[in-house]
Image: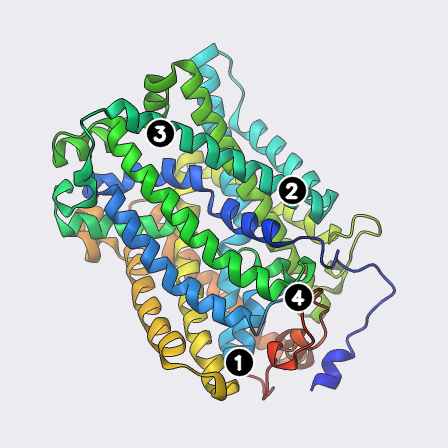
């Protein structure tokens, strides 16, 4: 089988920029994809509806929960890491059928990230310009401009786009940290230490659980560096470090910002905080202005814009490498397997992604409005990634139990995957049937009721596509699953045991 995999036409064309990014680039690919500033600003209000002032405790628990899946992925990428991302990981560990059909759901997340953020930031900036200087610029124009700029950034080269994420990620964290420090200092003696306790929630532990479930969603994308493995120097090392460091580091960031949010808004009573903060209009603009005047509001706007753009670049880089990989295997059209001669980027995949981002931003924005459109896409992200993360946890067990039995350790390869899967089922249930988890008053309303049928339809399309591939292109599925046999990974030791392939390539 490996002989067949190696026979994939090499073609006389340039390759991706092998070894172009190091540990810093990988780390900030993960950090910026989590969009830490936007993760706080767009999550905290909803978390507070039932969680009240327990934001700090909720993000502590969410960090622990996400670390379980991060630990599983860390183990997996020691054996499987390539531009194919989850498609290769799950196919190697679980077989073509489970690997392809579950990874197919990933397309409800990564390719839609730039569209969602361009649409949302377009509306946020449009509203801000009207409120502050009386100038109207339509959200859709801002969204198109943002997609255009991020497309050029991604097309220019992985080194350039990686440096962009490092700079923007650093600025984002610095700005939000300055604001957090100001809010904590302004609170003076009225420090909300109660935010570490369920007593700060109007519903006690029930409210903390609600906030924790939605706090988990602010970690989506911590694994975004995996599709850049072929462009990384010593990807095995940089991925294992960046996955854990980004999850722990941004988890700490969320906990500090959760505490600072409660301090900056002011806490006197759990229910009053829940009602006032969750129902406020743009509370972070208000807190920024309270701390630094109009400069504070501008800092919050900068943090949102910076976070949205950096996350979109990271998402575009990840999605386009997967298109390229599937084109290389022949699973997707071969024309996607193309690299620009001088920039060493998958140019056709990038232009495809630019078109998808523009179309979906305009489609969801005009159909549902930017805020509801973003909310619906966010729901799709949650459903898709919770399933993908669960399968990654299962892959950790399967990979070591069946292919690397001599390295199998019950705690990291069985206990952690089981716990990680159980934890991820909570946000999945909250996304699919919130009325059963949190009560009938939390049932999804239109357009969020479309989340489940869209997911089912998309899965059905993927299943039909898989069955067609199985019947017409079985060798291409094998090539995808055995990608680790052919890719060049710069800076790594030549260790065949660090390159897992599908040991038994029978289809399914």
Which quadrant of the figure contains the N terminus?
bottom right
Q: Position of residue 341 (x, y in %)?
A: 84, 52
- The tag earlier along the polypeptide, 2 or 4, is 2
**Residue 335 showing in the rendered view:** yes
How far separated are the C-alphas under marks 1 and 4? 16 Å
- The tag earlier along the polypeptide, 2 or 1, is 1
Query: Residue at 61% of width from left, 86% of height from top?
Result: 505
Considering every residue shown, the one lying at the far right of the view is 12
Q: Are marks 2 and 1 in contact (CB under 8 Å)?
A: no
How far separated are the C-alphas under marks 2 and 1? 36 Å
How far separated are the C-alphas under marks 4 and 3? 46 Å
Residue where numbered disc 2 is placed: 163
The label shown at residue 95 is 1
Crowding at dot 4, Cα within 10 Å, few <14 / some 14-19 / many 20+, comes out as many
Which of discs 4 and 3 lies nearer the camera? The answer is: 3
Q: Position of residue 141 (x, y in %)?
A: 58, 27
Residue where numbered disc 3 is placed: 181
Query: Residue at 37% of width from left, 50% of height from top?
Result: 217
Instruction: Name the element at disc 3.
Output: helix
Crowding at dot 1, Cα within 10 Å, few <14 / some 14-19 / many 20+, comes out as many
Which quadrant of the figure contains the C terminus?
bottom right
């Amino acid at each position: 089988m490996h002989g067949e995999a190696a026979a994939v036409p090499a073609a006389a064309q340039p390759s991706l920029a092998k070894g172009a990014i190091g540990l810093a680039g990988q780390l900030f690919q993960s950090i910026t994809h989590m969009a830490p500033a936007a993760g706080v600003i767009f999550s905290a209000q909803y978390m507070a509806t039932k969680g009240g002032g327990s934001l700090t405790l909720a993000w502590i628990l969410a960090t622990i929960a996400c670390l379980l899946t991060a630990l599983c992925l860390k183990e997996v990428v020691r054996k499987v890491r390539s531009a194919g991302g989850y498609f290769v990981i799950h196919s190697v560990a679980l077989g073509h059928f489970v690997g392809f059909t579950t990874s197919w759901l990933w397309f409800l997340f990564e390719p839609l990230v730039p569209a969602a953020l361009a649409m949302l930031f377009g509306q946020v900036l449009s509203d801000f310009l009207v409120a502050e200087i009386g100038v109207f610029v339509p959200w859709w124009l801002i969204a198109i401009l943002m997609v255009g700029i991020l497309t050029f950034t991604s097309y220019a080269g992985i080194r350039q786009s990686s440096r962009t994420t490092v700079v923007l990620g650093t600025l984002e964290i610095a700005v939000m940290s300055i604001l957090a420090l100001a809010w904590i200092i302004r609170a003076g003696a009225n420090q909300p230490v109660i935010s570490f306790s369920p007593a700060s929630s109007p519903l006690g532990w029930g409210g903390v659980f609600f906030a924790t479930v939605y706090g988990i969603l602010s970690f989506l994308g911590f694994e975004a560096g995996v599709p850049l493995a072929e462009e990384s120097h010593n990807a095995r090392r940089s991925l294992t470090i960046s996955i854990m460091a980004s999850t722990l580091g941004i988890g700490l960031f969320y906990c500090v910002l959760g505490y600072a949010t409660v301090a900056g808004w002011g806490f006197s009573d759990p229910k009053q905080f829940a009602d006032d903060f969750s129902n406020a209009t743009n509370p972070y603009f208000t807190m920024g202005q309270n701390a630094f005047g109009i400069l504070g509001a501008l800092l919050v706007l900068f943090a949102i814009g910076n976070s949205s753009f950096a996350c979109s670049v990271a998402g575009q880089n990840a999605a386009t490498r997967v298109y390229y990989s599937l084109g290389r295997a022949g699973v997707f059209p071969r024309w996607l397997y193309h690299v620009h001669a001088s920039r060493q980027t998958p140019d056709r995949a990038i232009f495809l992604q630019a078109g998808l981002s523009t179309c979906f931003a305009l489609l969801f924005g005009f159909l549902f409005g930017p805020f509801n459109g973003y909310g619906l896409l966010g729901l799709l992200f949650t459903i898709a990634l919770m399933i993908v993360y669960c399968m990654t946890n299962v892959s950790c067990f399967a990979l070591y139990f069946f292919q690397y039995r001599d390295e199998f350790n019950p705690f990291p390869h069985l206990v952690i995957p089981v716990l990680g899967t159980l934890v991820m089922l909570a946000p999945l249930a909250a996304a699919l049937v919130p009325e059963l988890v949190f009560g009938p008053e939390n049932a999804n309303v239109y357009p969020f009721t479309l989340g489940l049928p869209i997911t089912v339809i998309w899965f059905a399309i993927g299943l039909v596509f898989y069955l067609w591939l199985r019947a017409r292109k079985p060798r291409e599925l094998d090539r995808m699953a055995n990608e680790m046999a052919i890719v060049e990974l710069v800076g790594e030791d030549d260790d065949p045991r660090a390159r897992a392939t599908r040991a038994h390539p029978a289809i399914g």
